[in-house]
Image (cartoon, rainbow, N blue to C red):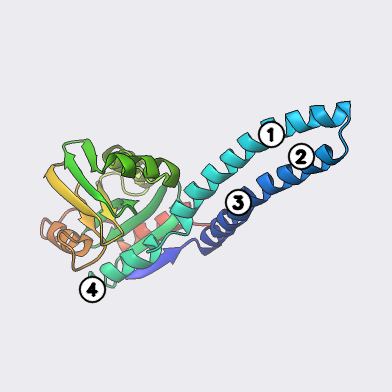
Amino acid sequence: MRVETNIKLARRNRQIAQYLFFASFGVPLIGLLLINQQAAAPTDSSLLIGFVIPLLVLPAAYAITMISVRMANNWVRAPRPEEIIPQGLKGIGNKAVLYNYFHSPVRHVLIAPQGVFAVVTRFQDGRFTVDGDRWITHRSSLGKVFSLFRMDSIGDPTRDAVRAAEHVRKLLEPIAPDVPVQPVIVFTDPRGQVNIISTDVPVVYAHPKRDPSFKDYVRDVGKERRPTLTPDEIAAFEEATLP
């Protein structure tokens, strides 16, 4: 399988996440130093500044921290999707191509002899239940509080996957309008546990030894002989959507 990754984008966003992490500590520290400096030589203006600084620093530090955590979850947290997904898909065929971070807001697109897949990933390592399009997180009350700070809510993977498939379908429309795009939800952390009651969007694991695995799902879809892109259409898709 060929893997195409927007390395420049991934590296840049990882650096931004790291800079924001340090800034989340630096901004409050600078604010504290300014307040102490004003307190050492109090004047009417310094008292006003001492009152204004916390009003500016605290919201700024909070915003930077939240953005930093979100960026870290998406671009730093291991295992990285662009690494674990190809490892799990080894053996599905040399004609398959996995695109990482080229087709925003869709982060991963798989074009294979078995079909075209819009891949939505989840990094969470907790326990979840999906019933139709309803996702339930199994956590204690304390765990839910910590989740707010970690910003690792599961969100709505079903909705995101359906939207991702529609986005890829629109990209393919000028090239291969009759080729369907299959949404799929892939959990990248092997510790994640999903109880599937029912779902319109397949839920799989990137790790090949977890069941159901992404690799086994793709192979099963291949037995249905769904339409997919020809080599010429893949080349046209890349020319139209890759930098």
Give the alpha-carbon distance from disc 3 to disc 1, as whole Å.
Answer: 19 Å
- Name which quarter of the figure residue 41 lies in: top right
Image position of 208 with respect to 40: above or below: below
Q: Mark 4 near mark 3, Cβ–Cβ under 8 Å?
A: no
Q: Is residue 169 visible?
A: no
> What residue would you read off at disc 1?
54
Measure the C-alpha gap from mark 4 to mark 2. Answer: 61 Å
Asked whether the beta carbons under mark 3 and mark 1 sit within 8 Å of each other, the answer is no
Q: Which residue is mark 4?
A: 91
Q: Amino acid at mark 1?
A: Pro
Look at discs 4 and 2 and give the one toward the viewer.
2
| Residue at image mark 3 | 20
**Residue 35, label in figure:** 2
Q: Earlier in the sequence, mark 1 or mark 2?
A: 2
- Where is residue 180 shown, x and y percent of the image? 24, 46
Q: Are marks 1 and 2 in contact (CB under 8 Å)?
A: yes
